[in-house]
């Protein structure tokens, strides 16, 4: 029994010494690399917006009344001038009849005034001759002349009344014509806001009865672009987008308008960019949310660098000592450095010197580069000693990175 205890003690001692030296050993540091490739790189600006018809007409009513008939419904195809609804015309017919009677009466009064004027002018002509022969006095002649002038004024007044009644008749006929609501364009009815029996009132704010999309085979997207990216958007640039209804399909478009009016929401400034879309297959519908990517730059046959290579920075002894002394603050410093290495939104052109690291004899060696356009996957190498196939360091792996991961996973300390 005593012999067994001695053997177990020796084994435990040896295991403890081995474990001590195992954990005290200097861990081997390794690096993960990625190759520099040659190919095309596309820089783009991402934005969201909603699809709408290029021309959407809201049809209202210019007269008030009760809807008597509706000839179209949702998705009905209509032609310009086609009747789409009708307001009860009874009151408008009565108004036309009344205006017609007033017009005929005014016309008769005008004819009566003209006849009286013609008679007075004949009398004036006779009296003028009789005055020359001394048959009548000057006073009688003046009375006849005054009568002629008065009848001329009466004719003018009758003509004015006739014009008023003519205008009233035209207005009544126009209102009767407006009681039939017609489509102003060729298109498709995408909205109907009235039913038979509903009373509509024409006022300063005309109610919308129907909404007609002129041509759903041609649509547009109004996307909101951040002020930081609007300078890179140009007319005729290509765009691609997806909608939730067809997540597996990518649609194409083109920038046709860049609006200068800013839209400010909670101190965030954006600008509206209009993207034209071909909808010949009629898959897209008004109101769909589109995730748009506008191609702002493209280069072919260039060297491409992984973005992680710019964020990598090897640890130095000073960094390790600082991390040991500061704990979480050291992790914050490392994160700040990594972020600074890859500063700038994907796709923005860069024109400054940066560093990446090659692995030579097991150690990272810095190489100065100048980068160009970029996206989420690649960064263009504009000036560099690097060539296609060179392996650049993108990550440090080993005990140091494990320590970093352990400290980074619980920045507030261990959980209890």
Image: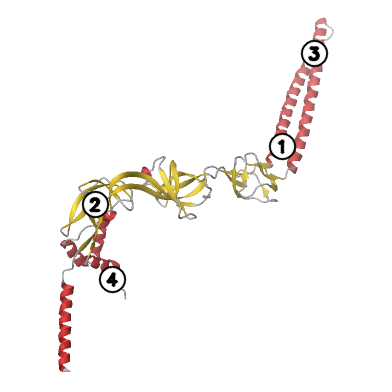
Disc 1 is placed on an element classified as helix
Q: Is residue 277 left or right of residue 397?
A: right
Quadrant of the image for the C terminus? bottom left
Task: Identify the element where label 3 is drawn.
Answer: helix
User: Residue beneath label 3, please?
Assistant: 124
Q: Can residue 139 be seen from the camera position used here?
A: no
Front disc: 1 or 3:
1
**In the image: residue 365, left or right of residue 102:** left
The answer to whether the residues at label 2 and label 1 have Cβ atoms under 8 Å apart is: no
**Where does label 1 land, which residue?**
172
As measured in the structure, the alpha-carbon distance from the residue carrying label 1 to the one carrying label 4 is: 85 Å
Which of these two is toward me, 95 or 57?
A: 57
Residues tagged 4 and 3 counted as in contact (Cβ below 8 A) = no
Task: Please provide percent x and percent y for residue 266.
Answer: 41, 52
First-in-chain label (4 vs 2): 2
Q: Secondary structure at mark 2?
A: loop
């Amino acid at each position: 029994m005593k012999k067994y205890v001695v053997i177990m003690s020796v084994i435990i001692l040896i295991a403890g010494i081995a474990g001590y030296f195992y954990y005290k050993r200097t861990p081997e540091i390794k690096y993960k690399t990625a190759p520099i490739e040659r190919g095309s790189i596309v820089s783009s600006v991402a934005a969201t917006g909603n699809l709408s018809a290029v021309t959407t007409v809201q049809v209202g009513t210019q007269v008030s009344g009760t809807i008597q008939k509706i000839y179209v419904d949702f998705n009905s195809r209509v032609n310009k001038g086609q009747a789409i609804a009708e307001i009860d015309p009874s009151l408008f017919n009565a108004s036309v009849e009344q205006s017609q009677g007033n017009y005929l009466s005014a016309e008769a009064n005008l004819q009566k005034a003209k006849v009286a004027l013609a008679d007075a002018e004949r009398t004036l002509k006779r009296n003028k001759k009789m005055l020359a022969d001394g048959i009548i006095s000057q006073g009688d002649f003046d009375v006849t002349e005054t009568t002629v002038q008065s009848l001329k004024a009466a004719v003018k007044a009758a003509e004015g009344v006739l014009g008023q009644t003519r205008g009233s008749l035209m207005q009544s006929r126009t209102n009767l014509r407006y009681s039939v609501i017609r489509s102003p364009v060729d298109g498709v009815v995408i909205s109907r806001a009235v039913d038979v029996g509903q009373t509509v009132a024409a006022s300063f704010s005309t109610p919308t009865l129907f909404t007609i999309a002129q041509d759903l085979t041609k649509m547009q997207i109004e996307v909101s672009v951040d002020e930081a990216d609007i300078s890179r958007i140009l007319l005729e640039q290509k765009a691609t987008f997806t909608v939730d209804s067809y997540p597996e399909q990518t649609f194409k478009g083109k920038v046709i308008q860049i609006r200068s009016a800013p839209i400010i929401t909670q101190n965030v400034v954006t600008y509206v960019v209009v993207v034209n879309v071909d909808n010949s297959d009629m898959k897209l519908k008004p109101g769909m949310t589109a995730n748009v990517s506008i191609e702002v730059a493209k280069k072919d046959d260039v060297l491409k660098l992984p973005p992680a290579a710019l964020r990598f920075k090897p640890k130095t002894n000073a960094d390790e000592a600082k991390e040991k002394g500061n704990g979480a603050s050291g992790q914050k410093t490392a994160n700040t450095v990594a972020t600074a290495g890859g500063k700038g939104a994907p796709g923005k052109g860069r024109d400054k010197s940066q560093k990446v690291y090659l692995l030579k004899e097991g150690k990272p060696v810095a190489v100065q580069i100048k980068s160009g356009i970029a996206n989420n996957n690649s960064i263009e190498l504009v000036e560099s000693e690097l060539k296609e196939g060179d392996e650049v360091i993108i990550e440090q792996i080993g005990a140091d990175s494990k320590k970093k991961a352990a400290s980074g996973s619980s920045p507030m300390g261990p959980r209890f």
